[in-house]
Amino acid sequence: MDKKINLKNPVHFLAVGFGSGLLKPAPGTWGTLAGLMLSILLWNITQSNLFFIFLAVISFIFGCYLCQKTSNDLGVHDDGRIVWDEIVAIFLMFAFLPEYNWFTYILTFISFRIFDILKPYPIRYFDEKLESGLGIMVDDILAAIFALISLYIIYWII
């Protein structure tokens, strides 16, 4: 039985990225875009790497609960509409970007989506082996780390 997302439930609302995870096609891409837009807004307000480190850590810990609770409610592990993990991954990336400009933001989006979709080793391993909310969150954090490394290589080359 396909259970529905309840946007009036704050846990579901956050887990689906303020509704971005309900957009089709590719809800993960829409969730990443929501995370990017929110991060750009917050960066323009704070311009603080420490703020984003704190935000990423708190959002990750809270996200383990959000994602697990929503998965349980839906009866599906890592339902594609759950995009909180993409948003938190972008928060993490914003804590460590090489530069803060539109070129970097576009590269952030593209590089994260590539690693989140392709899931090279060890990302796929953790995605398949870890269960619960932690499992939903970890593969995206690893994709963010791979994407950050790629960004630094690109900036080193250019």
Image (tube, helix red, strand yellow):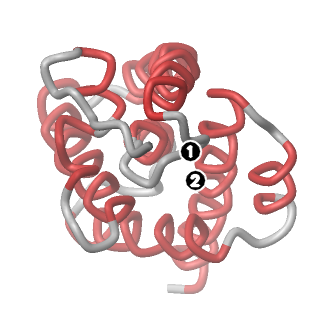
Describe the element under mark 2 as helix, strand or loop: helix
Q: Tag on residue 78?
A: 1
Quarter of the figure that contains the N terminus: top left
User: Residue 66: percent from the left, percent from the top?
Assistant: 45, 20
Mark closer to the chain start, 2 or 1: 1
User: Residue 53: percent from the left, percent from the top?
Assistant: 49, 24
Q: Is residue 84 above or below residue 144?
A: above
For image coordinates 19% across by 45% down, the residue present is 40
* Residue designated by label 2: 144
Q: Nearer the viewer, residue 66 or 62?
A: 66
Q: Nearer the viewer, residue 100 or 128?
A: 128
Q: How many marks?
A: 2
Neighbour tally class for label 2: few under 14, some 14-19, many 20 plus, Cα within 10 Å: many
Neighbour tally class for label 1: few under 14, some 14-19, many 20 plus, Cα within 10 Å: many
Q: Nearer the viewer, residue 89 or 64?
A: 64
Q: Is residue 136 above or below residue 108?
A: above
Q: Nearer the viewer, residue 28 or 74?
A: 74
Describe the element under mark 1 as helix, strand or loop: loop
* Mark 2 → mark 1, Cα distance in angstroms: 18 Å
Looking at the rendered structure, the kind of residue marked 2 is: Ala
Looking at the rendered structure, the kind of residue marked 1 is: Asp
Q: Looking at the image, do the residues carrying marks 2 and 1 touch, with CB atoms under 8 Å apart?
A: no
